[in-house]
Image (tube, rainbow, N blue to C red):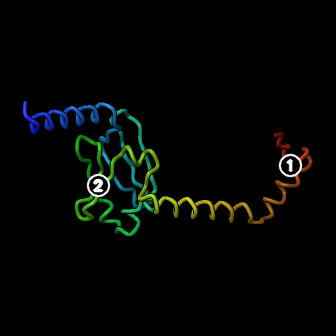
């Protein structure tokens, strides 16, 4: 067997392993109302991700996003007009873009959390008073 034949057999073996272990989409659709990508998996579960978290979809139009297709037996989601593909496995693992993009996204989400935690409202004040009556926040022990 020559190198080309062995390389082909190795690629087929790798593809078959990938098909048997990777999550696979049965159907994918864009929910315009909530701006979320909804992916029905072959195992009967559904995976949903906000498109604004996905780097390649952040600036795409609703029409472009809605043109999502499942590819390679459901292992990939693709957008022909955008010339982009994403592995379902990476999306489900929370990898929504490049490492630089993900760092910025984490910082953006952390800022939003800090701002929300720092906000004041009558309801938050009442909750703090009630919590104080119960002894306040539990102490942390080292």
Residue 23 in percent (x, y) is at: 35, 38
| Looking at the image, residue 110 lies above or below residue 71 | below
Q: Nearer the viewer, mark 2 or mark 1?
A: 2
Residue with the mark numbered 1: 131
Q: Secondary structure at mark 1?
A: helix
Of 1 and 15, which appears nearest the observer?
A: 1
Q: Is there a contact, CB below 8 Å, between mark 2 and mark 1?
A: no
Judge left or right: residue 116 versus residue 107. right
Quadrant of image for the N terminus = top left
The residue most toward the front is 2
Residue 141 in percent (x, y) is at: 83, 40
Q: Secondary structure at mark 2?
A: strand
Judge left or right: residue 55 versus residue 1. right
Residue 18 in percent (x, y) is at: 29, 36
Q: Quadrant of residue 56?
A: bottom left
Tell me which residue sits at (44%, 48%) in the image. 48
Tell me which residue sits at (19%, 37%) in the image. 11
Of 113 and 7, which appears nearest the observer?
A: 7
Residue 70 in percent (x, y) is at: 26, 48
| Looking at the image, residue 22 lies above or below residue 70 | above
Residue with the mark numbered 2: 85
Query: Which callout, 2 or 1, points at the residue further toward the start of the chain?
Result: 2
Quadrant of image for the C terminus = top right
């Amino acid at each position: 067997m020559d190198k080309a034949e062995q390389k082909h057999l190795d690629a087929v073996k790798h593809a078959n392993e990938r098909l048997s272990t990777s999550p696979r989409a049965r159907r994918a659709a864009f929910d315009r109302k909530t701006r979320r990508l909804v992916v029905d998996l072959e195992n009967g579960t559904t995976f949903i991700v906000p498109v604004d978290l996905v780097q390649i979809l952040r600036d795409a139009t609703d029409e472009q996003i809605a043109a999502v297709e499942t590819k390679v037996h459901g292992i990939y989601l693709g957008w022909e007009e955008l010339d982009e593909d994403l592995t379902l496995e990476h999306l489900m693992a929370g990898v929504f873009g490049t490492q630089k993009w993900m760092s910025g996204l984490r910082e953006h989400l952390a800022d939003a959390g800090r701002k929300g935690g720092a906000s004041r409202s009558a309801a938050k004040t009442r909750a703090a008073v009630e919590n104080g009556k119960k002894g306040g926040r539990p102490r942390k022990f080292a």
